[in-house]
Amino acid sequence: MKKDWDRWDVKSALGKKGYSLVRVAKENGYVPDGLSMVFTRPWPKVERIIANILETPPENIWPSRYDSKGRPVRCNAWRKEAGSQNNATKRKDAPATANSNLDGGGAAK
């Protein structure tokens, strides 16, 4: 099985094309430091953007994140896991905000 490219390999390849992660972020409407998460978790949309710049399919850069047909595999598993954690920590009767014990004027009830 192929190994994912190292973050520095991706950054180097982008640099050879005249790009940085900051430039990619700005040109695609993301905050300048926002794209660094692509190295720690699946993000198919950004993976495709980077892959297009590098003129290679995203599954060549991150083979562990794609199946044999080139479809993202881990993103759905990650979302399901994150969703179950969020649902487990939320209570229907829980206050909406940390300040819900305050009246409308900010004083304690």
Image (tube, rainbow, N blue to C red):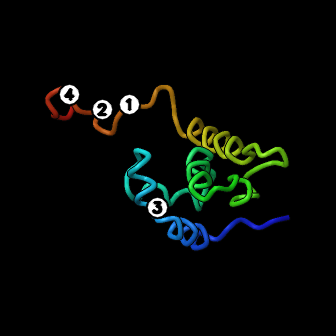
- In the image, taking residue 72 as reference, residue 8 lies left or right, namely left
Q: Are marks 2 and 3 in contact (CB under 8 Å)?
A: no
Residue type highlighted by circle 3: Leu
For mark 1, what is the residue? 96
Q: Residue 95 at x, y = what percent? A: 39, 31
- In the image, taking residue 24 as reference, residue 86 lies left or right, namely right
Given residues 92 and 52, the one toward you in this image is 52
- Element under disc 1: loop
Image quadrant of residue 96? top left
Q: Residues within 10 Å of mark 2 (few under 14, many from 20)?
A: few
Image quadrant of residue 84? top right
- Element under disc 3: helix
Q: Which mark is residue 103?
A: 4
Residue type highlighted by circle 2: Ser
> In whole angstroms, how far apart are the C-alphas of marks 4 and 2?
7 Å
Identify the residue at image location x=70%, y=58%. Answer: 62
For mark 2, what is the residue? 100
For mark 3, what is the residue? 21
Given residues 18 and 67, the one toward you in this image is 18
Between label 4 and label 3, give the one nearer the viewer: 3
> In whole angstroms, how far apart are the C-alphas of marks 1 and 2?
7 Å
> In whole angstroms, how far apart are the C-alphas of marks 2 and 3?
40 Å
Tally of numbered tags: 4
